Image (cartoon, helix red, strand yellow):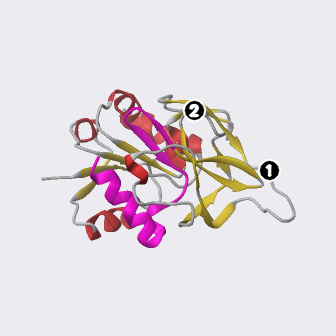
Amino acid sequence: MIDAVIVDSGGANLASLQFALERLGARAIVSDQPQQIAAARRVLLPGVGAAGDAMRRLRATGVDQVIPELRVPLLGICLGMQLLFEHSCENDTPCLGVVPGRIEQLRPSVALPVPHMGWNTLALKSDDSLLTDIGSRDYLYFVHSYAAPVSVCTLAAVQYGSEFSAVVRQGNFFGVQFHPERSGAVGARLLRNFLAL
C-alpha cells in the first residue's frame, strides 16, 4: 500500500524527500498524474525554483485543479508551501488559493542576505499535531527568497529581519517553509507527525 504521493512539481528535492519518507518506513511514489494524486492517502507538494514555473507545470498536468479539492492531509514544502497561497509576488503568479494570503519577497540587508539560507529556530504560535515534540530550540533548514506573512493560519514563525510564517495550516492543508528532508532528526520528526495525521 502506498502511504503518500509526492507531487512531481519539477523540483530537485523529489528524491531526497522520497528517501526521507522511506527511512521512516513509508512507501511513497512521485507522480504528476491527477488520478493518483486524487486517490492518495496523503500528499506532499515539494518545490524548488520559481513560483511561475511550478504553477505552469501543475496547470499543464491538471494537478492545479485536483489539489484544492483534496480532503486528505497535504504538506507543502518550501515553494510547495508558497503555492498553497492565493498569490505570489514572484512574477505576479496566481497560486492554488487554498490558504489565504500573498507571498512577498524577503528584503535583503548587509547583515541578512537573500536568499535566507541556513538553520533557524521556530517561534511556536499554536499547538498542532504536526508539531508534536518540536520545540522552540529545534533548528530547521531554510533556503528561500520569498515568504508568507504571519496570519491566523500560522502555526509557527521564524525571525529573519522580520517575522514570517514557517509553518501554516488551513484545514487539511499544511505548509512548511523549511526543508524537513534536510533538517536531520527534527525534520524526520515532522515528517513522522505528518504521516500519523
Asked if the stretch drawn in magenta spans residue 175, the answer is yes
**What element does badge 2 sit on?**
loop
In percent of width and height, residue 138 lies at 53, 66
**What element does badge 1 sit on?**
loop
Name the residue that disc number 2 marks: 152
Name the residue that disc number 1 marks: 107
Q: Residue at x 58, y 57 (%)?
A: 122
Residue nearer the viewer, 31 or 180: 180
Q: Earlier in the sequence, mark 2 or mark 1?
A: 1
Residue nearer the viewer, 92 or 152: 152
In percent of width and height, residue 12 lies at 47, 61
Q: In whole angstroms, how far apart are the C-alphas of marks 2 and 1?
A: 23 Å
| Mark 2 or 1, closer to the camera | 2
Q: Please tell me whether residue 106 is drawn above or below residue 56 in the rendered image.
A: below
Residue nearer the viewer, 176 or 31: 176
Q: Which residues are magenta?
A: 168-197
CA neighbours of label 2 inside 10 A, class few (<14), some (14 to 19), many (20+): few
Question: Left or right: 16 with respect to 145?
Answer: left
